[in-house]
Image (tube, rainbow, N blue to C red):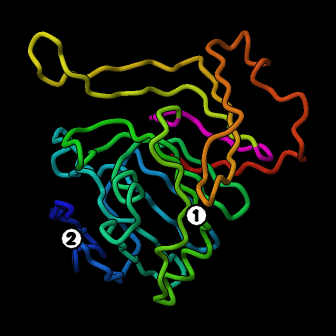
Amino acid sequence: MRILLLFTIGLLGPMSGWGQFVCFSDSTTIYELPGTEIPPILGEASFNSGHFRVIVGGKFLDAKNPEAEAVYNCDMVILDFQAQKTYVLPLSYFPPFVDEQFAGANFCYTMDQDTAYILGGFGYDLAENYETTFPTLTIFPLKTLIDSVVQHKDYLNLFQVVEDDNRLAITEGTLVKIGPYFLVYNGREITPIEDEFSDCLVVNEWDLRGQLRKFTLKNTEGFMEVAEFQMCNTSKVFYQCMPDKWSAEPTRVFELDRQ
């Protein structure tokens, strides 16, 4: 069973009526709160659809104590600017792998048409009991998710997951999608390793600046997996990662607000 965080952040203005984000273990409740103001947050994935904004992961800052360590956001937050309402979805109800990844920060993410893609990110692996870079790609239909939440319908089966592929373990990188191809450039990979002399875990970090990864996805026996993977390590040879034929017209890639 997940060990989840309960924390309270004092807020002013419209938020003073509730002033907290709460994660309950195995909770299926969708919380509806008045207003659309949330605490300062960084490292989140943010998607817009109509008058809604969906926020995944990130870390909340304490505005009264900016030097304090930020706290992981352990809920999905949906802001309805028209109704002036906030929906809070505890991640404990999300599918395996999705719940832990979405409680992380500094993802690679993008949106193609109405489909959201969240890759990698850094956060806490509960099974291993340490922080690491997630080797995960999660895909979900944004508007369908929003409609399901507003109408109080089940949303558990909306997520497709490519899991446990170390080629996807990237944080702080940039993700774009062109036709069937995913391109990931820059970023870092941060993983703990066991020190051979002390048997203690130490941080191992790879700087992926100047690196481009290209891949597609294929469905094998009902499971999504990475295909056509290629990696170019310097900008001078980026052209080597470009396919001879895109096999489809490049689709529009939405610029996302990362502020």
Quarter-of-image position of residue 27? bottom left
Instruction: Pick out the residue farthest to the front.
Output: 221
Residue 129 vertical placement versus 31 (above, below): above
The residue lying furthest to the bottom in this view is 151
Q: Dot 2: few (<14), some (14–19), or many (≥20) neighbours within 10 Å?
A: some
Q: How would you rate the neighbour count of disc 1 (Cα within 10 Å): few for under 14, some for 14-19, many for 20 or more?
A: some
In the visual, does 210 lie left or right of 104? Answer: right
Residue 179: say if magenta. Answer: yes
Residue drawn where x is 68% and y is 25% of the image: 230
**What residue is shown at x 40% (from left), y 77% (from top)?**
87
- What amino acid does circle 1 point to? Phe
Q: Which residue is mark 1?
A: 140
- Percent position (x, y) of residue 168? 52, 37
In this rendering, position of residue 233 left or right of residue 137: right
Rendered-image quadrant of the N terminus: bottom left
Would residue 66 be found to the left or right of residue 168 on screen? left
In percent of width and height, residue 21 lies at 25, 68
Could you say whether the residue bearing mark 2 is in a helix, strand or loop?
loop
- Can residue 33 be seen from the camera position used here? no
Q: Is residue 158 magenta?
A: no
- Magenta-tinted stretch: 168-180
Residue sitting at x 75%, y 23%: 241
Q: Earlier in the sequence, mark 2 or mark 1?
A: 2
Q: Amino acid at mark 2?
A: Ser
| Residue 199 horizontal/vertical position (percent) | 11, 19
Is 29 located above or below residue 259 in the figure? below
| Residue 1 visible in image | yes
Q: Which residue is mark 2?
A: 25
Q: What percent of the width, then of the height, locates residue 169?
A: 46, 35
Give me the residue at 89% from left, 28% from top.
244
Report how far apart the C-alphas of labels 2 and 1 lie in the structure. 23 Å
Q: Secondary structure at mark 1?
A: strand
